[in-house]
Each structure stands twice: as structure tokens, then as C-alpha cells.
Amino acid sequence: MLELLRFLPLFFCISSSTSFPNFFQPNVAFNHMARDPGSGYVYVGAVNRIYQLSSDLDLLVEDSTGPQLDSPECLPFKDPKDCLQASSTPNFNKLLIVNTHSEELLTCGHVFQGICDKRNLHNISNIIYRTVDPGDNQFVAANDPHVSTVGIVERTEGRDVMFVGRGLTARLSSGIPPITIRQLNKSPIFSNDGLGKLVVGDFSDYNNTFVGIFSNEGHVYFLFYRRGSKSQMEYKTYLGSVCSQDLLLYSYVEVPLVCNGGYNLAQAAHLETLNRELFVVFAATQGSGPVPSNRRALCSYKMEDIEKRVERARSLCYTNSGKGENDQEESGIEYGVNSKCGTLPEDSSTNFPCGGEHTPSPIASRISIDASPLLTDHSSLTAVTAMVEDSNTIVFLGNAGGNIDKVFVSPGQGLVYNTMEVVPGSAVSPDLLLDESGRLLYVMTESQVTRVPVAECSKYDTCDSCHQARDPFCGWCVLEGKCTQRKQCDNYLERNHWLWSFDNLTHCPIIEDVVPANQSRQDQTDISMTVLLLPALADQGSWQCLFDEWSHLAHVEGNQITCPSPPSEVLPPNQQGKDHVTLKLALLFHDITVAVTNFTFYDCGAVMELSTNAPCGGCVSSPWRCNWCLSDHRCTHTSDCGQDQTVIYSQNQNDMQHFLWGPDACPRIERIVDSRFIPVGIERKLDLIGRNFHLLEGEEQEYRCAVEVEGNPMILPAHIERVAENENLYQVHCDAHKYEYPLQVMEQRVNVYAVTGSGYRVDNEKNVQVILYNCSVGQPDCSRCHALDPAYSCLWCGDEVDASCVHSSQCEKKPIDICPTPLIMSFFPQTGIIYGGTTVTINGVNMGQKAEEVSVKLAGHPCDLKPDLYVVSNRIVCTLSASDEEKSGPVEVIVNDRTPGVSNQLFTYQDPVLRSLTPTKGPMAGGTIITIFGSKLSTGDQITVTVGDLPCKLSDNVTDKEIHCKTNPSPELQELTLRVFYGTTEKVLEEIQFNYTENPTISSAVPSSGFYGGGRLIMVSGSGFDVVQHPLMRVLAKQSPEELRKGDGESRRRRKRRRRRREMDGLTLQKFNELCILNSSSTLECMSPSIPENLVPVEVLFILDNIQIAFSSLGENFTYHRNPTLRPLNRDMPNNPYSLKPGNVLDIEGEGLDSGISKQEVIAMIGDGICAVRTLTHSHLYCDPPLVAPQPLDASTSLPEFVVQMGKLQFNLGTVKYDVEGQHSFPKEAIIGLAVGGALLIPVVLIIIFMYRRQSKMAMKDYKKVLVQLENLETSVGDQCKKEFTDLMTEMMDLTSDLEGSGIPNLDYKTYVERIFFPGHTSSPLRKTLDVPESKRVTVEQGLTQLCNLLNNKLFLTKLIETLDAQPTLSQRDRCHAASLLTVALHGKLEYLTDVMKTLLIGLIDQCVAKNPKLLLRRTETIVEKLLTNWMAICLHSYLREAAAEPLYMLFCAIKYQVDKGPVDAVTGKAKRTLNDGRLLREDIEYRPMTLTVLVKSDGEMQRVPVRVLDTDTITQVKQKILNHVYKGTPFSKRPPAHTLDLEWRSGNAGHLTLSDEDLTSLTQGQWKRLNTVNHYKVPDNATVALIPRLHNNQCDTPNNSFLGGEKTPMLEDGEDGGIKTWHLVKSQEEPEVCKNRRSSLRERERPKAVPEIYLTRLLSMKGTLQKFVDDTFQVMLGVNRPVPISVKYFFDFLDEMAEKHEIEETDIVHIWKTHSLMQRFWVLILKHPQMVFDVEVSENVDSILSVIAQTFIDSCTISEHKVGRDSPVNKLLYAREIPRYKQLVEKYYSDIKQTAPASYQEMNSSLTELSGIHSEQFSPLVALHELYNYIIKYYDQISAALEEDPNGQKMQLAYRLQQISSLVENKVTDL
């Protein structure tokens, strides 16, 4: 076979498919094609359509699938309000699968997140199942048209499942794994619940682009490409394998496929099942990304090799940790999952051929399968299929050009033997299908399906054409006379009966050695021949020889054939102009032609007739055996001319016996004597030289000369004379004659020959001609006459006025030898550059006879002549010399130094100047029109422009001030200098350069449809539009097929299809353009061009100067819809006005109204008034007319016209007449009565108005007074806020600078989790160790480990939680504790915990929806609710630290600072500065700020640190302020407690006084003892103090100490000292709520009491001061200008999905769910308790303020209207103005999250896996498991019963496993 390929020619056939059955749908993009092998039906999935075709491609059923109202950002919805961004979306078909088992067609589109349908195979309009209200697990196909999806149906265990592979999308359904298995027989259909899915750790690293899918030998194979791994940027192709019976994907193994030569991206594939060979079309990458280039190759792989590689990778990963020989890793685990290759028993791969739960997966082979290309190609191969024919493998390849290449494959190489054009220019789809017989191929291109045969043997009607086809399917059946496939030929096994076309070593039967080779048509002889490759046949009587239509039996001996020639009378006549006739000599077997050759019959008589100039020479020099009879003047095939006749024999019989032979023996004329030039009008003789005249019966014979002028011979008498030198040489003397000819030309050639007396023409040797000429023709001036060749003897003769050019013999006057002065008629250009080099052309008369004798001057400067361009007398072309200045002067032409000819016009030397250009930049593609400005630019005519070295083509005429040129493309971005060349002189524009910028790009264009009438506004988005000068939108269209089909009946359709197609292909595309308007560099506004409706749009383009961008390249082609039709307003009488009542809505009926436009674009006018369009449907337009009748636009008409404009389409629907009701006539009496009543009523009304105005003025005065008071109060509070805020910002700036060094005191992750999981617990499981005896530790730990494994069983865990939640004796606190224990135990598997939590939440949501959905997640009453709290805390920890920590900590510090700036009562906890009115100190306490100098020992040195305090501060408060200042950057837990230190006041060297809250100096009045303050001790400002260790711990053991330390609530009970009570700033009974039931003393009653509400302004002041920090904190919690945490997005999507599932249409409910799950469950918790995040101490005052802020945040998240009144709590009144703004932030936050791209399942899992890994070592789950076990054992019976009741739990023996765990752990408990 290799030898055959070596001998094959380098060319191959190209055929056309225009005659084959096809299905064509213009303007419809086909996506996929499938075929039912049983019925032969072909199915085509297209954009918005699906078709069912017969096997002959006749349309049987068509159904619509789109467009649909959809958005990839939304889950499938019912109400458009649920997806505001939804728009009309074309539905691309993503999957089209024939399920022959169930006789179903499975179809999936990309809309609605890729849902699928089932259709009846026999009628696709019959939808068996449609996915309605799908769940997450029913999203099958990619929701992006550009992301691939593949699928195949397999029958497993009696049920059908669908294996699906799909790429990554960035939209809502991106969480779908790349490979899933879908159920087809049970509900929910198309779901992958309980079936396998290939989970990916990080989808961005494993973004598979799927190319194909197929099954073989019990396995399903996925072909795809992706990056190798995280660390590899190179893209590779992989083949993934999985057992067909493995519905959990345990057996998944993938192997890299390599096609050598850099081809790494698979594009199409096909498995040939007979030889089990996989053929893959590869492409080389274009750059580093996954963009395929045009460089393609075909590689093949044996399935046996693939299976071996898969099995080895699986076996090594199971048993040897993936290691092969030399410990090299040959297989491993991919897709970022937590699994590793293991060391299972050696027989694991045999025992578990399809894997199992315990086997590692997914496995990837590290060793690739390599192949060398069978074929390389540069035509962008796109499709492949293959078959085996007679042990020969044939591959069919489709390419982007719309062709099918047929490839013969031999070991190691492939050869294209035929290329078939299917649809030129339209890429072939990868869905290339062969029928079951392997004889028909279905080819799908963009809009057409064509059925072509794999071989067209029958079209080769001859053996040669069959053999030249080189088609391996074909061969020549010799005895049947046709090209057939092998088995179609009888006796094909016999030798020479069937000759294979592809075998270059054989050929057709041929006839050789024909004797004689030809013969005269007058003869009849036997003809013998040899036939090669003649089939052996016993029946000799069946052979015949056929000469055209005359046949005769042939005599056959071996391969020798003999047969007689036909008689002359049956031969056809010669063709006109021919001297022979050639017949086909065929060897026939019966009626079948076996071999053919040509046989010629010649006619000597015809030879003579055709040889007009030399009849004798033509006869004897012909290729035939013809002789010349001299006397008879006759050509004959015989050698007998009669008695005594001279015969001249044929040159083909040149043996020595013939004396006369060949043309040299014929009598002939050879040449003219002397000159051939003969002037007209002058009598001249003519002599000729001839030869062999002695053969014409002697010299005395009479002769004549014939001169042919214009076909009319002039006969002249002549005589001959022998030339003495040579006896065979003769001279013919023709008599003198005056010659003339009618044509007005200088000369004319005429033939001359001799005629004998008998009238026979003597031969001419070649052409014997003379030249007749006329001097006066074509010589208008002296110079041209003198320039003639002297052989003509022409002179310029006559006077100067009437001189002319004549022959010298005709000149009767003195000839003129010197010509007149040159006359210059014109010259161009009239300007030239001073540097010379300009080419000037001068036209005139008498400007010399030769270039050598002519010289030229322009403006006094010489001009160098170009001799090759000189035209005698009339034109001079010269090159200008340089001039030293600009000047003007005439043109001078000098001939032979005579007087020059001078022009009337002046020539000017100029020096052009370049000044500027515009524009200064343009795209690399070129096409920018540059305008160059300057002066004298139009200099010369040889002006060229370049930008750098790139030509710039002149586009307009050059003027003195402007040059316009169009730039050429540039290969790179660059700035270039512009240069203008004047001839060879270069002018450079130095100051300004032209900048080649990036080419403009288009990213989107909307909308994508319009009417044929055009005019729809298309908004084009992209980049670089500012460099485009002439943006266009262009439509290429051709004649509609419907026009070509007019008149064709259905019965003639197939017969005329080929003719129609040829006519269509031959049509010229018409262009329709529309200019676009440039809005900005990124937006264009284009109007869709209008095209006639009888044309079909072929392509829609955007023309950006030199760049053409197809609309279809943007993802969707522009669709033209038929123009709409609108019916007149007055349908009954269209010519009459339409009566319209004001306020009524106009309803216009029509068809196709909304197919190409939206209601916002429709303009409806009634005269000059607008009729506002409210609704536009397919058949109706509703608009609101003006209430008042508008004026008509046409002044000549009285009624306005109703006009509807849709783009460029304008519809006049008739005139409109407004119906205005006439005035009703009132009775005169009624009018009089009304007048009298009105007169009496007027005075009463005036009195009422007067009284009302007086009262209004008084009320206005009171209002103004109150307003002034409020303004004063607001000003006062505002000023105070400004001052306080300034101080606070200064302090916060200092704090910020300190934080840069020390950082925010964040809690470590373990403490953070502990405080949220186990709030209020003094000892959490995270701090404990497992307290068991060492002797039982191993057993207990083993039991707890098994419990951990059992918790990883989803069924057990869900049953455990549900059972615990159902126990009424389990308290809420215990539920939360158990949830936290579970979270700790499963912290290492957060992805699993998330899945379980979602499952439990689904059940909880079902319960709440049935009762009251608004109560969902409101409290933490169940385990799953606490799980959600913990889950949020874990997932948002990083966001909390990275984003929210700083503003939250700054808020905390700002509150603490503000509180400490004012007095705080140490006993009651009330403060002057607060936000909580319950904690407001409602007394005007006098206080004085002061500074203490604190001695602090640092690095062995004593330093003085100033600390600000108040003179009203207690000693403990002073100590706390000192500690806060000194340990500013130190976490609270690392500071010394205040109660362990004493404050010592140092005055001088010896004066040391220890200060305390209570001592002997404390003031006591009755039962009240006042705490000591700084002022009590009279400590001065700037006093020196120090903190020293406490020596006497009993010194301050007062009941208040615990609160003074900020740890507990105030102690207001009686003290221990006989009922003594302590107080600080105010006494407790002075509070209204305390003293309202007590009797006051006289002194107390007499003391003036301050109104408490006056001090509420302090709340406002505090609120205004903290406002910025509250805003910052709220904004970071609401994600303002920050990315949404993936966990929030994921959970919110889950809530949206649940709401949609339960058909909850109230958005308020979903809003409440989100608030309960995130805001109240996490952010409010953190906001109220910053100690859960930071290592800080939160005092009661700070806590109360944070409670107000947290409540404000809660109010902001509610959906109810925030109403406040005078009875509203003060806390709500404080933020009444801000809460609406915060509500908007919350709503925007929720809305933005919903509109962002969905968080995929893989991305969420990847994030959870990362979190699990980061903190995996911080938790030891044994203690948590042990405590959890206590809950399990407490409710053991209930849990066990629940597990036993579940069927799946019984199968998995969950109760038994729990019993085993109990046995292990209980042993340990018993011993305890």
C-alpha cells in the first residue's frame, strides 16, 4: 500500500455537492445534528429551532425553541419581575441526543440555565417531558452559547442514564461539575441526585473544554482539553474513561493524548469501531491561550493502547501509590480533591474493574499516548468521521471552508484523494454522520444540511475518469463498462475484470500497435491491434470492433484483435476546415466498450483545398500519404496520375526511388525583386523570383500576376525569364501599373502570386507581399514627414501655408528641408519643485524628428529629455533640473540650435511647505484618511506620501493647501514621521508624528434584530472607536431562494434543485450601507440598513475604515424580520376619519409588530402631538393619544394624520377626528336662579376668608417662634458636634498611627471560634483534653474515631440532628451546644458540613413555609440554625479580619474615647456621653479635665507619660485610664488588672500618697458614703503619679470593685457596713424611677430640679460625633465598594432558589430570610459583642451604646416602614433620619448580590476546602466527639429507632455501627 501512495499524483479531484439532497434555512444558525438509525430520520438543533428531516432531508416537522425571555444571571423564573435583567434571548441548542432505547430525542438549550426536554423520535413536536421549575441538579447544559457540552445515553441495569460533560461558565450555573450522570427514567428527570459527578476543587484550574464523547467496550470516553495543572500554562488534550456501569464515577481515569508537532487542542473526534481506532483532529494553539490556530493535524490512536494505558494508571494508583518503574510517578489524583493513590491489594484493579467507594479517584495518567500526524493541514479542519472499506480505512474531514476532504489512511500516513465542496465559505460542523450502510454522509454547515455519498463511482462514466478519480471505494468493471464499488461488479475476483481505482500500478484496457495507423477514406483494409489488460473470456463471439456507428465482428487471439475497416460510403464527411475525419475505434463486449482508440481517415482532395497559397506544397507536406499530380493540378492518395504525368510524391514517402518528393519539388514563387515599397498614384513595374517553372511545360506558357488589394485581385500580364545562373530559378516580370488602395492609412500590405495559363495558381513560398504606401497620410507637419524612413522617399513640399508630405516624384515645388519653429500647445505639470526631478510632458507641433536634436528649458533651467518617451514632433517628456530659488518662466523647445519655440504659459518653480496633519492617530489596520496642511503642496504631478516607510495612498486631488491620503496597515504599534515625496525630493513633517494605535474592537452590539425596512438603532460597544473616521454598518444580501423557486411545483422541486442552487451561487452579493455615529471611544450608534424584502441577508458587518467585523462574531448574528403590517384605524372605511374620544386608548392591529423593534423605539404621532406607546405585542400596538386634538402637520388638511414610525418605516394609518361633546342648553330660568344664589353667597364667603386669614397669621407667628428656638438648639448641638468630632478625629488619627505599629488586637482563630460557638462557657471543648484513663484511652479513641467516620455518613448525620431536634427535653442551650460540637468535629470537612446543613435547611424551610415563612431563622431554636451561625462565622472570618475589623475597631475605640471624655458614674454606670437614654447622666455635673504625669518604667528607665483624666474620676477610673493609655497597643488579656495595682501620688522627693476609692478620708453623710475622686484628694493638674503593685489586698475590697473593673453590673444593694451605701456622682434615689414613691425632704422639695429632657441634646451630640464611624462600619458590613464574600453569595442564591421552589413571590419574605441569616445572625452579634473579635474589655457604657447602634442596624434591615412619633423610644428617634438611607444600602446590597455572577458549587467547595486545610491543626475533635456522644447516648433509643426505620439506614447498618461505637465508649465510661 505504501508503494501505491508513493506513485499517486500530487493532485486530487475537487467535486461539488450542488446536486445532492440538502436542507437549507437562511438566517438560521444550526448547532447540532443527530440521526435515528432505525427510521433514518435526521434531527437538526438550531438557534431557536429544531427540525425533523427525512433521510432524503425533506422537512417533516419543525418546532420553535426560542427566543426566550431569559438572562444567564437568573434562575428559571415565572414572573419577569423576578429577573429584571431578562431580555429576549436566542436559544442555542447545546445537546441533541437520540435515545433509541426509549425512542426519545433529548434536547437541551442554553437558556434557563441549560435545561432539557424529551421529544418523540417520530414527531419532535410531541414533547414527552419538559423541565418545569427545575432544581439545581436539573441544569444540564452550559448556559453560555460559547461553552461546549457533550452527552451520550447508556443503558445500565435496565435504565437509561445520560453521561454529560460541560465546560465552565461564569454565570449562575457555574456550580455544575464538568462531568455528571443524569437519570432519564425516574423523577426528577435529568437530575443527578444520587448519581456520580466529578467534583472539582478549583474550577479555574480544571476548566475542561469538551470536544467529543463516545462509548466502546463498556466504557464511556470524554475528549477534552485544558491546562495541565496549576503550575502548567500549556493546554493539553485528555481522554477521560469511565465504566458504563459505574454510576458514581469511581472508575474515572484520564490519559493525555499528544499529537506530535505542537498540535495540542482537540477539535473533533470519531471512533472507528471495526478496527477500534480513534481519529482526532488537533489544532495548534494561537499564542498561550486556548485559541486554536488554522494549523491543524489528524492523529489516530488505537483503543487497545488507550485501554492499556488506562488500566496501568488505575492499577498503579490502586496498589502502588501511582509509582511505576524506577519509582517514577505514572498516575495520580487530579481535580484538587482530597484523595491520594494508595496501596490496596494487588488484585484490587481486577476485583474492582469499575472502582469502588474505597478506591482512589479521579485518576490521571502522567504518561501520555503519543502519535504522529497522519495529515497536516492549514485549512482549519473542523470535523472528522471514518469507516473501513475492504480492509482500507477511509477518513472524511470537514473544514472551515465548507469542504469535505476524503483521506485514504495507511499505516503512519494519510492522503487526501478527493475534496468535495459542500457549502463554500461555511464551516463544517463536527457533527459529521455516516449512515448504517456506510454509503451516505450527512454534512452540516452553518445553515444547511447536505447528504452526500461517500463515493460517486457512478458519475465516472469512463474507465479513465474512474481510474483518475483515485477513489478507494471505486473500480472499473470492465465487462459491465461502468465504475462501481468492488462487490457491485460480477466476477470481480477474476483477473482483469474489476480494476481498482486507487491502484496506481494498474490502468484501463488500452489499444496499442494499430496497423495501419491511418488510411485514406477511399481505401478499405484489415486493421490489427493489441489490447492490454483484456479480461479473459471463453466466449469469442461476443467481441466486436466499432467505428463510430459501423461495427463488425472481431477476431481475438489472446490480446491480439483483427477487424476490417469500414467502407468509404459509411464514413462521415470531413468537418469544415479539416482534411480528415477521426473515428472512435472501440472494442466491444456485447454492448459494453472495453477499450477505445482513435483511427483517422484522411482526404487528399481536402488537403489541396485547404492549402490556398501553396496547393502543391500543402499536398505533399501533409501528414498523410498524399501525392501531387502536376498536370492535373490534383492531390491524390495514389501514386498513379495517368500516363506520362509528372508526380510529386508525399514527403512521407521519401525513399530514393522517387526523384520528385516533398514541397521543395513544387513550382513556386519565392520573393519580390528589389524594394517591396510601392507608392500610390505612380506607375511601377513588379518583378518576382520563382523556382521549378520548367515542370510547367516550358517557358512559352502564358502567365499572369495577381495583386490582391482588399481581397480583390488585380490581374496583370506577365512573362517569365530563366535566370542564367541556375536553370531552376526563374524571374516573373509583371507589367507596370499605377496602384491605389481605399484605406486612409500610411501603408497597406498586399499579396502577390502567379497564375498559369490554365488558371492554376502557382505556389507561394510563405507569404509574398508588397507594401503600398501614401506619404500624405498621417504626416500632418514637417517634422513628422522628414522623420519617415528614407525608403519611402517622402518630402515636405509646397508653400509654408499649404505644404504637405508627398513622394519625391510628386513634388512640383521646392521641397522644404528645414522645418518651422516648434509650436508648444501645452505642458503638464505647470509647477515643479525647486530641487528638480519633476517629470514634465510637453505637447506641440514640429518639435523635432529625433530626441537627440531636441533640447528643452523651463523657466531658464534645462530639462533632461527621456528618449524612450519622445514622440516625433508631437511630445517631449523631460526631467526638471534644480533651481536655486522659486521662479517662473516659459517653456522653450530648441531643435538643432534653431530658434526655440516658446510657450504662452509660464512654468513655476515652487518649494512646498508642510505645516500640520490631522488626525494624528489611526488604527494599525490602516484606512485612516490623513489631511496634510501646508502651502504650495500641489507642486508637480509625482506626489507620493508615506507614513514612515508605509505608503499612504492619495485619495483626492491635491490642492495647494491640502493633501489627502489613506494609510496602509502597520504591523505594530508605532509612531512614525509623515513624508511627502515630490518625485525623488522628500519633505518631512518633523513636528508631528502619526501614531498607529490598537485596532478598534467590538464587544457587543444590541439589539440583534430588525426589520427589512431598516433604521433600528444599534448600540455598539467596544474600544478604540475614536480612531475610526467612517464607521459603517453593512449588509451583504443576495436574491431570495423563494424568488428563484417561483413557478416551481412541488413535483419539480428535486429535479430543479441543482439548477436553482447554481443560479443562487452565481448571484452577485449586493451591499447596503448605513453610516454610524460616534458617541465616544467605546460606543457607536448605528442604524440598521434597509434592504429589499426579496433579498436574503448573507452577512451583517461593521466597517471600521479598513476593519470588517462580522456581527455574527459577537455571538449572535443580526436577524432581519419581514416588515410589519399595520391596519388602518378606520378598518371599515379607511378613507374616512377615525372618531376618537379624548382619554381613550388607540388600539392598532397588525402583524409582526414586535419582531424587529421594541415599544420604546416606536414613534406614534397624531398631527404634531405624540401618542405615547404603552404596549407593543406581535399583533397590537396601544398608545395614549393627546387629550386635546393636535394640529395637523399639513396645513392644507383640517384633520391630523395618525402616523406610526418604526425605524425607517413609516405607516400612515388615516386621519383622526376628536369627538368633543357639545354644550347642553340650559333653561333661562335656571341660569337666573344660579346668578341670584351666587350673589347672596359671595358676602358669606368673604367673611369666612377674613376670619381664616386672621387665625392663620397668629398661628404663623407662633410657628416662627418655635422654628427660631429649634434652629438655635440645632445650631448649638451642631457646633458642639463639630468640636467634639474634631477632637475625636484627632484622637483617632493618633490611634491609627499607633495601630500601624501594634496592629488591631484581633483574637486568634481558635479563640474567635470558641467565643462564638460556646458563648458564656468558662471551659469549652477547644480548651480541654480527653480525660480518660490511659488503660482505656485506645479503646475510647477508637470508638470516637468510628463515631467521626459515622458522622461522615450523610444519612446518619441528618437523622441524628433531626432526632435530637425532636426531643422536647433537649433545651435550646443544649441544642446550640450540640451544633457547635458537630461543627468542631466536622471542621476539617466543611464542604460536607455545608451539604448537610443545606439538606437540613431545606427541611426547615419546608416546615416554616407551611406555617409562617417570615419566622424562618428568626431565632436559634434548632441545631441547624446554630450550625448556620457557626458556618457564617467560619466563612466570614477572613472578610471580618481583612475588611471589617478596622472600621469596627475604630468605632469601638471612638465610643470608648467619647465616653471617657465625660463623667461616668462609677456606681450607677450612667454617663454624660452616651447614645442610650437609659444610661444618660441627667445631671449637670461640674467637672474639670486635667493631666496627670505617670511614671512608667520602660527598658530600665523611668519615663514620664501624660494621661488625661477628669477631676471627678474615681481612683479606679483613673487607674483604668492610665492602663488604657500606657498599654494602648497591648491586647487586654496581656495587661495587668487594675485591682492588682495601687495609684500613688508623688509630690517632691519624699511625699508619696497611695490613693484609693475608699479610705478613712471618704465623706459619709448618713447612710451614704461617697467614693473618693481626684478632686477629693486635691490632686493638682500635671501632678506626678505612679502605678505600684498592691500590698494590701483588703484595701479596696468594696462591693463595687467588681463593677469598677468593668466586669459586672453595678451593686446598688446596701453595703456591709451597717447599711452604708456608696455613691459617686448622683445618689440612686435621685433617679425619677427610684424616688417617685418616696416622700422627699423639705430641702429636696425646695431645690430646683433640672428638666431631664434638656440633657437629651447630649445624645444628639454623641450621635453626631460618632456618625462617621457608624457609617463606615455599616458600609463595610453591607459590602459597599467591596466584593461579596462567596459564602454570602452562595447562601443567598440558595435562599432565592428555595423561595422560587416554594413559589414565594413576595420579595419581602426573601428579604427577611436574608436578614435573619446574615445580618441578625452574624453582623449584629459581632456589632454588639466586639470582644468576640478583639481582645478588648467592653464596659457597660460602651455595651449600651453598641446596643443602640446594633438596634439601628436591625431596624435598617427590616422591610416595614420606619415610622416614629412623639411616643417612640429615644433610641429610635436618634437615627430616624439615617435609617431610610441605611435601608436603601441594605436593599442595594441584596440586589447587587443577586445580580452578581452565581457562586459555583466548585468555587464554594474550593473555598471551604481551603478553610478546612488552614485551620485543620487547630482543632482536636476527640473532646467534642466525646461530649457529642453524651447527647447521643442520652437519646440512644430514639436515634437507633430512627435509623432502623429508614430503609437506606437498614441497608447501611447504621444502627448496628452506632451500637458498636457505644460498646467501645461505654466500656471506658463503666470503668470511670
Image: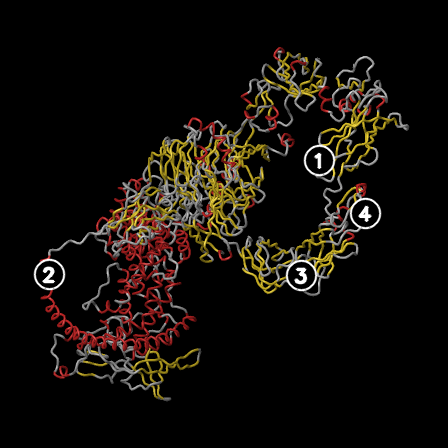
Image height of 148 relative to 515, above or below: below
Badge nearest the viewer, 1 or 2: 1
Distance between the alpha carbons at the discs numbered 1 and 2: 117 Å
Q: Is residue 1645 left or right of residue 1455?
A: left
Q: Is residue 1866 left or right of residue 307?
A: left
Tell me the amino acid under the disc marked 4: Lys
Residue named by callout 1: 742
Other-residue count near label 2 (Cα within 10 Å), few / some / many at <14 / 14–19 / ≥20: few
Of the residues shown, which amino acid type is indicated by label 3? Thr
Quickly name the residue at label 3: 908
Tell me where residue 385 appears, x and y as whole percent: 51, 34
Residue occupied by mark 4 = 814
- What x and y, as percent, mark residue 172? 38, 49
Residue 710: give its label: none
- Whole-Å distance between the Cαs marked 4 and 2? 129 Å
Disc 1, SS: loop
Q: Using the rendered image of the protein, determine whether residue 1754 is visible from the camera's viewpoint.
A: yes
Report if the CB atoms under discs 3 and 1 are less than 8 Å apart. no
Residue 1234: numbered disc: 2
Residue occupying the point 34% across, 44% down: 1153
Mark nearest the camera among 4 and 2 is 4
Quarter of the image with the C terminus is bottom left
Q: Are marks 1 and 2 in contact (CB under 8 Å)?
A: no
Residue type beneath disc 2: Leu
